[in-house]
Amino acid sequence: MNRSLTAIIEREADAYVALCPELDIASQGGTVEEARDNLREALELFFETASADEIQRRFQTEVYVTQLEVTVG
C-alpha cells in the first residue's frame, strides 16, 4: 500500500532538513534529493516498526502548507 505524505525541506547551514508534518518525523541530507530520500527511508522504517496504535496516535490528517504576507518593521 502506498500513502501520500507531505515533505517540507529547508536548508540549514550546509545541509537540508526534511520534515513530514503528518507524523512529525524528520531526516536530513547534503542535498534536497538526499534529504527527501532519507525522509522516505525514515518513514518506511517507522511504518514497518510502529504499532497500529502509535501510527494512529501520531498521524495528523489535516496539514496545511501555505504562505502568508506579514508586515515587517
Image (tube, rainbow, N blue to C red):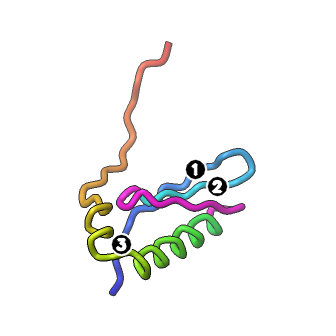
Point out the residue furthest to the bottom here: 1
Kind of element beneath mark 1: strand
Query: Disc 1 marks which residue?
Result: 10
Residue at 38%, 67% (x, y): give it.
Answer: 5
Relative to 49, say whether 11 is above or below. Answer: above
Name the side, left or right, on which 9 lies relative to 52: right
Give the distance between the C-alpha atoms of the residues marked 1 and 2, in whole angstroms: 6 Å
The quarter of the displayed image where residue 48 is located:
bottom left
Q: Identity of the amino acid at label 2?
A: Tyr
x and y percent of residue 7 in the render? 46, 61
Q: Residues within 10 Å of mark 3 (few under 14, many from 20)?
A: few
Q: Identity of the amino acid at label 1?
A: Glu
Give the distance between the C-alpha atoms of the residues marked 1 and 3, in whole angstroms: 20 Å
Residue at 51%, 73% (x, y): give it.
Answer: 40
Kind of element beneath mark 2: strand
The verdict on residue 30 being magenta is yes
* Magenta-drawn segment: 21-32
Q: Earlier in the sequence, mark 2 or mark 3?
A: 3
Name the side, left or right, on which 18 lies relative to 15: left
Mark 1 in CB contact with mark 3 (< 8 angstroms): no
Q: Earlier in the sequence, mark 1 or mark 2?
A: 1
Residue at 54%, 67% (x, y): give it.
Answer: 39
Mark 1 in CB contact with mark 2 (< 8 angstroms): yes
Q: Earlier in the sequence, mark 1 or mark 3?
A: 3
Query: Disc 3 marks which residue?
Result: 4
Name the side, left or right, on which 29 lies relative to 2: right
Give the distance between the C-alpha atoms of the residues marked 2 and 3, in whole angstroms: 21 Å
Q: Residues within 10 Å of mark 1 (few under 14, many from 20)?
A: some
x and y percent of residue 70 in the render? 40, 25
Kind of element beneath mark 3: loop
The verdict on residue 36 being magenta is no
Query: Disc 2 marks which residue?
Result: 16
